Image: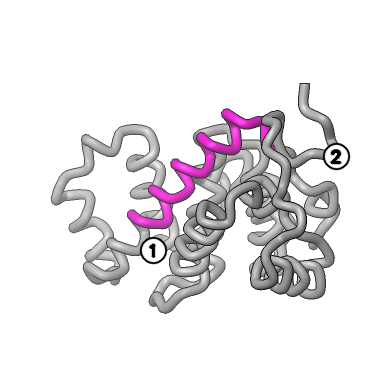
Amino acid sequence: MTNPKEPTALDLPMMDPLPQETQKYFDICQEKLGMVPNVLKAYAFDVEKLNAFTAMYNDLMLGESKLSKLEREMIAVVVSSINKCFYCLVAHGAAVRQLSGDPQLGEMLVMNYRVAPLEARQRAMLDFAAKMTRASAEIEEADREGLRAHGFDDRDIWDIANVAAFFNMTNRVASASAMVPNAEYHGQFR
């Protein structure tokens, strides 16, 4: 059983003390978010693993891309919904609510993105991410052409694929370790 005071069900305590740069990063999270996300605490037993995780996350979710931050969060939620990842649905559902200013959209994406009033471009993007999640080996040129027909270029397709792939990986880690979402996420941006 998961201890709600620990980020996961695994006995992997955070480094104590945290390295100076890690502590600085956690302090920035606390200042900007009002919390340190439990996913970061979960990785904080090993600074190299934490740094690898945060570098990939920051590149995919905050780095340069023609996909908006909201679109990347939408992909995270749709992938996490298919994978039934409680941690990511709670955390990234809150991000969709915040970035869209629409709590109903956030809930629709968490439950079933097909009921959400999306632009055709967004639906094509999420359909691609969903197919990648369910059956990545079945992606064909027609799937990429479908994205191109909605105005995505090959770099955009690369970004969609990488965001979807990242969350497929993190969903599995979060579920396997019984990662607990921060309680603060539940009430945010409603």
Relative image position of residue 163 (x, y in whole percent): 42, 56
Residue located beneath label 1 in the image: 121
Which image quadrant: the N terminus?
A: top right
Looking at the rendering, the stretch of residues picked out in magenta corresponds to 161-179
Residue located beneath label 2 in the image: 5
Relative image position of residue 64 (x, y in whole percent): 42, 78
Instruction: State the residue in front, 36 or 93.
Output: 36
Judge left or right: residue 163 versus residue 90: left
Residue projecting furthest to the left? 141
Q: Secondary structure at mark 2?
A: loop
Q: Main secondary structure of the magenta part?
A: helix
Relative image position of residue 165 (x, y in whole percent): 38, 48
Q: Secondary structure at mark 1?
A: helix
Query: Mark 2: few, some, or many residues within 10 Å (few <14, many ≥20)?
Result: few
Identity of the residue drawn at 56% across and 67% down = 70
Does the rendering let one see residue 71?
no
Judge left or right: residue 89 versus residue 57: right
Q: Is residue 129 magenta?
A: no
Instruction: State the residue in front, 183 or 132.
Output: 183
Do residues under tags 2 and 1 come within 8 Å of each other at their CB atoms?
no
Say if 59 sits above or below 177 in the image: below
Identity of the residue drawn at 71% across and 29% down = 9
Judge left or right: residue 166 versus residue 23: left
Query: Mark 1: few, some, or many residues within 10 Å (few <14, many ≥20)?
Result: some
Say if 64 sits above or below 55 in the image: below
Identity of the residue drawn at 79% across and 48% down = 182
Quarter location, residue 32: bottom right
Q: Is residue 173 magenta?
A: yes
Identity of the residue drawn at 63% across and 54% down = 92
